[in-house]
Every structure is written in structure tokens, then in C-alpha cells.
Amino acid sequence: MSELNLYKNITIVMVLYQESFELLSKTLNTINSFKKIIIDNKGEIKIKKKIKSQFSVDRYILNKKNNGFSAGYNQGISLSKTEFTLVLGPDCIIKEKDIAILIKKIKENRDCYIVSPTSHDEHNNLTYAGGPLPEDAKKDIILDLAGDTCVDSVLGACMLFRTKDIIENNLFFDETFFLYYSDDDLCRRVKKMNKFIIQVYESKCIHQHGIVKVKNKYLKKFIREYNFTFDRYYYFFKINKHLPIINEYKKRIPLYTLRFFLKILTFNFLSAIELLSKYYAYHKFNSKILKK
């Protein structure tokens, strides 16, 4: 594929929330020639102006409300008019040649709906990019590939697909997931259609595995644990209303309450916040999902 066709055939969608310009610059430097749609869930005008003064961006949308990672990606995918769309985390660096490899691989395999590169850290150590679904195994085993490999799930940090495959089959990210598990859920639905997902050996990316950007450590802990817990409840609930894990957590609620007060009394406020977040996540899940 020629460089011109490569640039014309793909749109890169990025979702931001309180990202630093330094981090974004590293990501944008290698993809500046591509069409890009940026969704800023924080709605930061200053960083928009700074980015647009130094980088080419086709659409830059400032959202007034943060509806989550999944909703942001869907917003960008719906605006993509090219044959391929690459959803890319702001903390994930991928070069032009590696994007070209991803497109080559997906074009060679019509029944492949998603391709993803093999991920490394800044020291060239392998990091997690794909593997089993959460219901099948823990997602902490880094695949040391010798070639392209079919996997059950890949991270939404760098995921390329044909735009029409997502839109025509209504394979958008489930927006009930705010921050976690939406990539697993999407991949699970792709596998259910008897389509497959490839982690491409020759295509590389550097994934810095972003964390919650909030500076206050107590608020950061609450946001992370609250969203992770709720999204985990919801993911397992979607698997044929898989209730054993829900019931297991339900039994823990009285224990969480007792431990919360013990942590307060011993001035261990960070642990208390973690327990409080899990308590609120369960009650949100109970009212929003179970009681529907």
C-alpha cells in the first residue's frame, strides 16, 4: 500500500482526559500524517489549542460531560469516514510502518475483525497486549509470540478494524462500561460471531499503560476502584447473567462495611476509600443493572 493510500484509508481515534501535553506529543509525533479524531472528555480548550498549533487534527471535539472511555471511542468511530479505524490510547506510541503492517494483515484475513500490535514498554520489554477473556483466565500473562497469534481479547489501547464491520454489525463499545472491560466485551462479541482477532507479531507499539490522571491520591483511589469494580460486575453479569461472581461480592458487603470503620479508626484512610468505592460500586450496580 502506498503512503498516500495508507493516509487516506485510515482514521485514528483518540480519547483524552486530563492528559499531559508531553505524553500526547510523543504519541502524536509518529502519526501526524494520518487523519485523526480527538475526543476530549475533559473539554480542555487550552490543550486543544496547543495540540492544533503543532499537529494536524481533522476533528477535535470538546465534550462538556465525561461519559467515559467507551462513549468517547464510539463518538469517534461514528465520525470516521475511512475504510479503517484505529482506536489509540494517548499513552500508546505506534509508528507508520507498524500501522501499515496491521492494515496488511487485516486485509489478508476477511474473517479477522480486529488486529492489534505486540506491545512493549519504553525499554523494549514485552507488555500485555492480548490473551484470554477474563472469564477464562487471569489477564496477567504476557504472550511471548513467535508469529501472528489468534487471541480472544486485545487491549483497546491499540486496536484496528474495518469501520463498516463495527458500524454495520453494531459492534460499538458498550457505553455502560465507563473505563474498564469494554475491550474484553467487544472482543467477546466478535468471537461470538465466529470472527477472529489477531495479535500481530511484526507490528510493534510502545504502551505506557496509563493510570488515572487525578492528582489527589484519595480521589484517584476512589475513581479507579469504583469504576473497576462496577465494570467487572457488569461484564460478568452480561455473560448469560453470570451471577456467581455477583453473589460472591454481595456476601462481602457487610465485611467491607466493618473493615471500612476499622480503617477509619486506625487512620488508614486510603484503604478506607478503597472499601467505600467498592461499596458504592455494588449499590450502583444493584440499582442500575440488577433492578432493571
Image: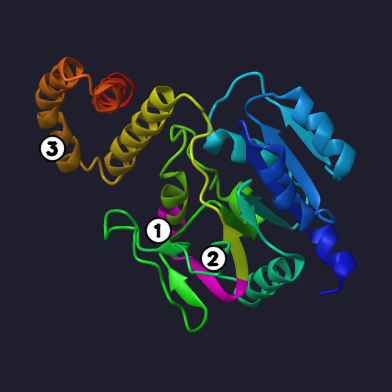
Distance from the alpha carbon under mark 2 to that under mark 1: 29 Å
In the rendered image, residue 200 lying in the magenta stretch gets the answer: yes
Q: Residue at x 33, y 21 (%)?
A: 288
* Quarter-of-image position of residue 257: top left
Q: Nearer the viewer, residue 87 or 43?
A: 43
Q: Mark 2 belongs to which amino acid?
A: His
> Tag 2, which secondary structure?
strand
Answer above or below: position of 59 versus 30.
above
Disc 3: which residue = 248
> Tag 1, which secondary structure?
helix
Q: Is residue 268 visible?
A: yes
Answer above or below: position of 277 versus 179.
above
In the rendered image, residue 265 lying in the magenta stretch gets the answer: no
Disc 1: which residue = 192
Distance from the alpha carbon under mark 3 to that under mark 2: 35 Å
Quadrant of image for the N terminus: bottom right
Q: Residue at x 40, y 67 (%)?
A: 142
Disc 2: which residue = 120
Quadrant of image for the C terminus: top left
Q: Position of residue 18 (x, y in %)?
A: 62, 31
**Residue segment shown in magenta:** 188-203
Q: Mark 1 belongs to which amino acid?
A: Lys
In primary-sequence order, the first of circles 2 and 1 is 2
Q: Nearer the viewer, mark 3 or mark 2?
A: 2
> Tag 3, which secondary structure?
helix
Q: Residue at x 74, y 30 (%)?
A: 61
Q: Mark 3 belongs to which amino acid?
A: Glu
Q: How many marks?
A: 3
